[in-house]
Image (spheres, rainbow, N blue to C red):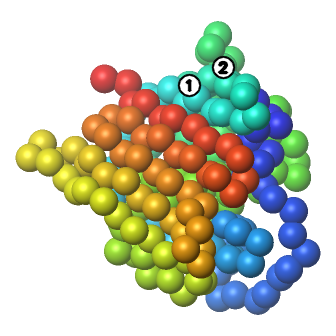
């Protein structure tokens, strides 16, 4: 589990000053994504989720309680026995991950970025990604019940690097560049 999540924290020597208070997230070797304000969330989330992480043919599953709205994101992670694996939070004031299982080198900004790519408004994401040389293509949209059924594709120079498929209460995330993916299923 930890090794799969470490992929969210790629190593890079490149740095550049930014007006953001957060460390940049390298979505590719050159594209530095700066976290968006919490107000850009598409819709509030307050539910239990099952998270299945895939990396190199291995799959790890954990549970989470996720609360996210225009004020920020709070997430508590648990293993199958209900033992706490960590707490994650993001707001416009800061981002943190407190966990006995994640190494200190794991940066919470990477968890926040993946969450934003899945749950934040596509217009805001499109602008932010365009500013760093990436493109966001979206196929589909909402249905009459307000559920989103869409595919988000993030590319660099025509090469697909991330694909997010949202279908009702399930999100499938695949990072082709880094070689990991996960499925989020909201409990009903």
Looking at the rendering, in which quadrant would you find the N terminus? top right
| Image quarter of residue 88 | top right
Looking at the rendering, in which quadrant would you find the C terminus? top left
Measured Cα–Cα span from mark 1 to mark 2: 6 Å
**What residue does disc 1 label?**
63
The x and y percentages for residue 175 are: 62, 52
Mark 1 and mark 2 residues within 8 Å of each other at the beta carbon = yes
Q: Residue at x 64, y 52 (%)?
A: 176
Image position of 162 with respect to 143: above or below: below
**What residue does disc 2 label?**
79
Instruction: Give the secondary structure at mark 1.
Output: strand
**Residue 34 as seen in the image, left or right of residue 15:** left
Q: Residue at x 74, y 41 (%)?
A: 5
Instruction: Give the secondary structure at mark 2.
Output: loop
Pick whichever, 55 or 18, lies toward us.
55
Q: Residue at x 51, y 35 (%)?
A: 183
């Amino acid at each position: 589990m930890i090794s799969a999540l470490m992929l969210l924290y790629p190593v890079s020597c490149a740095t550049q000053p930014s007006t953001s208070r957060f460390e940049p997230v390298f979505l590719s070797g050159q594209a530095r994504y700066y976290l968006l304000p919490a107000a850009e969330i598409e819709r509030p989330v307050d539910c239990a989720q099952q998270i299945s992480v895939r990396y190199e043919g291995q799959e790890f599953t954990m549970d989470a309680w996720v609360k996210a709205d225009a004020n920020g994101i709070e997430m508590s992670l648990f293993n199958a026995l209900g033992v706490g694996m960590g707490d994650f939070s993001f707001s416009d004031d800061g981002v943190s991950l407190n966990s006995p299982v994640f190494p200190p080198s794991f940066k919470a900004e990477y968890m926040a970025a993946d969450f934003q790519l899945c749950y934040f408004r596509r217009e805001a994401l499109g602008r932010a990604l365009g500013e760093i040389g990436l493109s966001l293509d979206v196929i589909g949209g909402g249905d009459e019940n307000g559920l989103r059924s869409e595919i988000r594709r993030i590319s660099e120079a025509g090469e697909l690097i991330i694909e997010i498929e949202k279908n009702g209460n399930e999100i499938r995330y695949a990072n082709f560049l880094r070689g990991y993916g996960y499925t989020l299923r909201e409990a009903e």
